[in-house]
Image (cartoon, grey):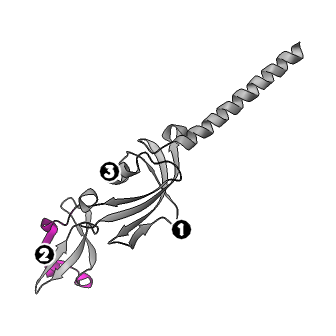
């Protein structure tokens, strides 16, 4: 009788452990991208049609926490609900990405304020903002004694296309 009870208890423990492990595996497979989940993606960013601006292909994938503001809000919204191994093409209009080109972000400065090596149109440089922090800009035009600097983001005014693949989704609680 004791043998049968031990055998039944052993089978019960085995089945319970197997069931929990299978349930945990199913839970991992069923996780979709939602706030506070750790998401691993591969992506390629295309600008102006098929020009590759940036990619993780052949490199380390991007790992971020959904809803934490690490990605553009519009990109996160498009990834929301996707599951592991899912792929998606996401098109963002300028106003959903880095905004339209703003004319008030073009500033004319005296040419002598620009170091000589940057006195060509298209040169990128950093200048100090009012708060003392560096700000990226591009030399848009060179005039006789003036330079026009463009402080717009380099992707402002552009439609962006992301080709995204979800590599993994984990519950943040798994990592304490």
Badge 3 element: helix
Q: Which contiguous range is marked in magenta? A: 100-119
- What residue is shown at x 89% (from left), y 12% (from top)? 1
Instruction: Look at the picture and state if 161 lies above or below 48.
Output: above
How many residues crowd around disc 1 within 10 Å: few (fewer than 14), some, or many (20 or more)? few
Kindly identify the residue that appears in the image at 54 percent across and 39 percent down. 174
For marks 1 and 2 on the same chain, the one whose residue lies earlier in the sequence: 1
- For the residues bearing labels 1 and 2, Cβ distance under 8 angstroms: no
Where in the figure is residue 167, as x and y percent of width and height? 53, 54
> Disc 3 to disc 1, how far (Cα)?
26 Å
Inspect this view and state whether residue 100 appears.
yes
Nearer-N-terminus badge (2/3): 3
- Label pair 3/1, CB-CB below 8 angstroms: no
Residue 47: image x %, image y %?
A: 34, 70
On the image, numbered disc 2 is attached to which residue? Answer: 109
Between the residue at mark 2 and the residue at mark 3, the CA separation in whole angstroms equals 34 Å
Choose top left, top right, bottom left or bottom right for residue 113.
Answer: bottom left
Element on which disc 1 rests: loop
Sequence order check, earlier mark of 3 and 1: 1
* Residue at mark 1: 58
In the image as oriented, which residue stretches furthest toward the bottom? 144
Label ID, residue 73: 3
């Amino acid at each position: 009788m004791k043998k049968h009870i031990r055998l039944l208890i052993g089978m019960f423990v085995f089945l319970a452990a197997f069931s929990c492990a299978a349930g945990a595996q199913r839970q991992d497979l069923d996780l979709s991208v939602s706030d506070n989940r750790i998401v691993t993606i591969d992506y390629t960013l295309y600008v102006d049609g098929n020009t590759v601006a940036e990619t993780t292909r052949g490199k380390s994938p991007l790992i971020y926490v959904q809803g934490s503001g690490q990605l553009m809000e519009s990109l996160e919204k498009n990834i929301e609900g996707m599951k592991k191994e899912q792929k998606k093409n996401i098109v963002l209009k300028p106003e959903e990405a880095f905004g339209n080109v703003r004319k008030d972000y073009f500033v004319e400065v005296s040419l002598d304020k620009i170091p000589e090596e940057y006195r060509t149109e298209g040169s990128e440089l950093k200048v100090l903002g009012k708060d003392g922090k560096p700000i990226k800009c591009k030399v848009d035009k060179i005039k006789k004694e003036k330079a026009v600097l463009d402080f717009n983001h380099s992707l402002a005014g552009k439609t962006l296309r992301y080709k995204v693949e979800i590599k993994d989704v984990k519950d943040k609680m798994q990592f304490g």
